[in-house]
Amino acid sequence: MRQQMQIHPDCNEAVVGLINQLPLLFDELCAVLANTAAPGLAIHAAKDARSHARERWRQGFALEELYMELDLLQRCVNAAVREYFAEINSRTAQQEVHEAIDRFFSAATRNAIRQFRSEQERHVADALAERERALAAQRKSDERLRIAAEAAGLGIFEWDPRTDCAVWENARMYEITGQPKELGPMSARQFIDTLVHPDDRPRVNAAMHAATSAAADIHEIFRIRKLQSGTQRMIEASGRFVPEVSGTGCVFVGTLRDVTARVEAEEALKLADRRKDVFLATLAHELRNPLAPVVNAAALLQRPGISADKLLWVHGIIDRHASHLAHLIDDLLDLSRIAAGKITLREQPFDLKTAVDQSIEINAPTAAQRGHRIEVIDTSPLPLYVNGDLTRITQIISNLLDNAIKYTANSGHIRLKVGREDSYASISVEDNGIGMDPDLIPSLFEMFEQEPAAPTGRKSGLGIGLTVARSLVEMHHGTIVASSGGRGHGSCFTVRLPLCDAPEAAIAGMAPDPSAAKEARRVLIVDDNVDAATSLAVLLDDQEVRVAFNGQQALEIARDFDPEIVLLDLGLPDLTGYEVARRLREEYAGKNMFIAALTGYGQPEDRERTQRAGFDQHIVKPARPEEIIALIRTA
């Protein structure tokens, strides 16, 4: 057969293809018979075959009937041939026709078988290719899962509760548990009995039992102790039961993750939140405490005929507690600036002993009130020059002294030792106070951390002094450490700061002699806080002072008063202090007028803004009277 038959699967398209194809088969058969000695037979056979095929096709055709149809078709053709040769006596022609028909149908059958096999092989090849693609996709998906699990730090395992056998899918399981790889995986029961913390074991066993009984999911966080190293870790276990490949049961597929860092971070946040609450309560207490004596002192001042001694006593009360409030506010502001990274150091070489002297001067009144003796031990006969901010280093030493005074019982002994250690200057503050638990020492410099109680039975201060001290020491490239022999054995704080070369020439003291006679200066005080402005004017009663309570009034007074010094608040009700300073500079251009900002705004950006606006100095409220008087004398 010269033209090949198209063999298709058993479907509607196959039926249509065969219906269209078989008439061509008949045509070929007719052409074969036409070449024989009986052309009439060809026409007769073709006619009968077509009639038979059309009738069969109308009844419906299926692929599996192919061979039966070909056989039936061959018999029909042979019957027609025999009928034809019954009328024509020609054995030779009859034999040739039968041989041609046999060859034709044999070739058709072989071709059909060949095409059927080819189609089957193609189907098998397609199925194998599809299976290979599915396996490749599964391998790719498994690889992605493994990569994701490794990136997430997950250990993957499988456990069969019927046999108590386990499979550990990746090396992370061995890393999490500390199990040597040569020993192979543990079963779930071995894992719980060997690694899980005894206090957590009942909970984990109950969760596994519930999951096994109900084929439910499990999610637990518990402690384990790693094999070999013995370190304790927090583990998160998750998983669920899934059908086994064979379909005969379920296996537990789960993951393990080491969540120690996350749990510790969560606990640290909770602790910080508790410390914050304690700090806010302490802050309210510490701010209210100094206000009570100040209010009482104000009431005493209203009494007529108060004696000079009592007036001096009231003055001392107000001064001490106002200084305490100012100190609290300064600590809070420093804490905020440190957290925001806005502390700017004014570094210059100076003798560290200067800062020591100033810090003792600051804390001496409080120490005397408690009956403490401050002993200074100087082991270095030469100056100890450091490159730093004198004010900030004085603050560091003052905070340490203040801490020693708070946590030492009355009539205590505080030793301040100054010396040199290699290329560092060393300052240590040691007391014989309540001491510290060694376990608490590492956290003492954390924000809001305090020793549980002062000798008075309550906490004193805000718990931020040591935090500020440590930050300032680190900004000066130094170190600070604490030590204690335990409760009741006192404490010691040691600061080490890098030494620098001495300045080329000693700088003469620049502070003016307070006893030197100075003529009165014209001072203009501008502040919308009437009490603050008038009380400052009373303090400067040895000067020629005028007071203004808003910006416009200040400009009007300045035209007649011609002030030499202006102490100017920034937050005025009409004009800002910046605008007042700008107008004064314009109206009195060429005159030597000293303008100082006296404000509650003390951030570095506030200082930069006042400098740009033409201020000569920036003073943060509340300023000590000595500072204002010194400014008046040196401006």
Image: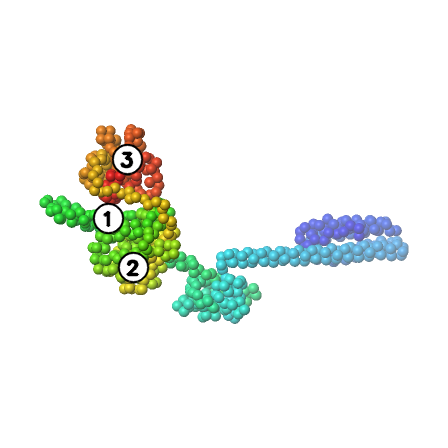
Residue 594: image tag: 3
In this figure, which colouring scheme has been used for the structure? rainbow
User: Eyeballing the image, is 289 above or below 226?
Assistant: above
Q: Residue at x 54, y 65 (%)?
A: 244
Query: Along the line of sight, which residue is nearer the eye, 581 or 221?
Result: 581
Q: Of helix, strand and loop, which one carries label 3?
A: strand
Pointer 1 with pointer 2, Cβ within 8 A: no
Pointer 1 with pointer 3, Cβ within 8 A: no
Residue 323: image tag: 1
User: Where is residue 97 shown, x and y percent of the image?
Assistant: 85, 54
Query: Along the line of sight, which residue is nearer the eye, 60 or 492?
Result: 492
Q: Residue at x 43, y 63 (%)?
A: 233
Residue 544: image tag: none
For the residues carrying marks 1 and 2, which lies nearer the camera in this image?
Answer: 2
| Residue 164 visible in the displayed image | yes
Q: Residues within 10 Å of mark 1 (few under 14, many from 20)?
A: some
Q: Residue at x 25, y 51 (%)?
A: 361
Q: Find disc 2 in the rendering and name its residue.
A: 430
Q: Amino acid at mark 1?
A: Ser
